[in-house]
Image: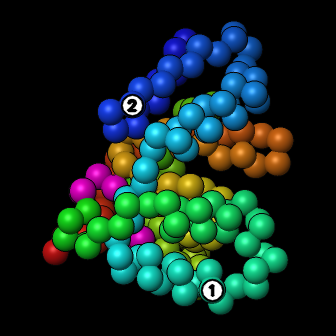
Amino acid sequence: MLISFHCGEHFLQLKPDRQRCSIELWHMACYSLRKVRTVILTEPDCTILAFLLDSIPTRVHRSIPLGNLAYKLTSATIVQPEAIPEDIVTMHSVFQIREYSTGTRYTFSLVFPWEANPEERRLSITSLLGSTVLGHSVGDVVICKDGGRIIQFAIECLLFQPEAEK
């Protein structure tokens, strides 16, 4: 099996062992992708998310989801809503992802913390998966580290993006 990561013009392939991929291999992939993949965010989303992070005590920013979100806000390409590509996950987008290890598909709406509702599949931006998918595009593979587990998700499709509707 060969796992491919497409990041714009960059391409990374990993060949895992038969049982499972080593954590070191995934860390290498995460590091490589972080170096070449620039996420795209809308200016209004960035403004609201910056206010959200400013309202949270600094010591809490050390958590993985908030640290990931803070990193994205400082390193992302910021565009006006009308300029965002239609395949990018933005706030209030509805997207489908597939977990690589199980093949299970999930559909979520990416929302602010005060709008989150697990029963309605409304995923908070302050969750690990929410902060990871923001700004990525359909076809991207995102990697979440949950404790000692590394979970890969492929963003399969975008069912709704508010900016594309305008």
Seen from the viewer's position, the closer of residues 128 and 5 is 5
Residue at left 68%, top 64%?
Answer: 67
Which residue type does callout 2 highlight? Answer: His
Q: Is residue 90 magenta?
A: yes
Q: Which residue is mark 1?
A: 54
Residue at left 65%, top 89%?
Answer: 55
Q: Which residue is mark 2?
A: 10
Chain-order first, disc 2 or disc 1: 2
Mark 1 crowdedness (10 Å alpha carbons): few <14, some 14-19, many ≥20: few
Whole-percent x and y of residue 98? Answer: 50, 40
Q: Give the CA distance from mark 2 to mark 1.
A: 34 Å
- Res 121 seen here: no
Q: Is residue 50 magenta?
A: no
Which residue type does callout 1 highlight? Answer: Asp
Q: Element at badge 1?
A: helix
Residue at left 24%, top 57%?
Answer: 86
- As displayed, is residue 96 above or below residue 22? below
- As displayed, is residue 111 above or below residue 133? below
Question: Which quarter of the figure has residue 29?
Answer: top right
- Point out the stretch of residues depicted in magenta: 85-92
Whole-percent x and y of residue 146? Answer: 76, 49
Whole-percent x and y of residue 139? Answer: 38, 39
Mark 2 crowdedness (10 Å alpha carbons): few <14, some 14-19, many ≥20: few
Q: Is residue 149 left or right of residue 96?
A: right
Q: Main secondary structure of the magenta part?
A: loop
Residue 114's disc is none
Q: Check contact, mark 2 vs mark 1: CB within 8 A.
A: no
Residue at left 16%, top 75%?
Answer: 166
- As displayed, is residue 139 above or below residue 18? below
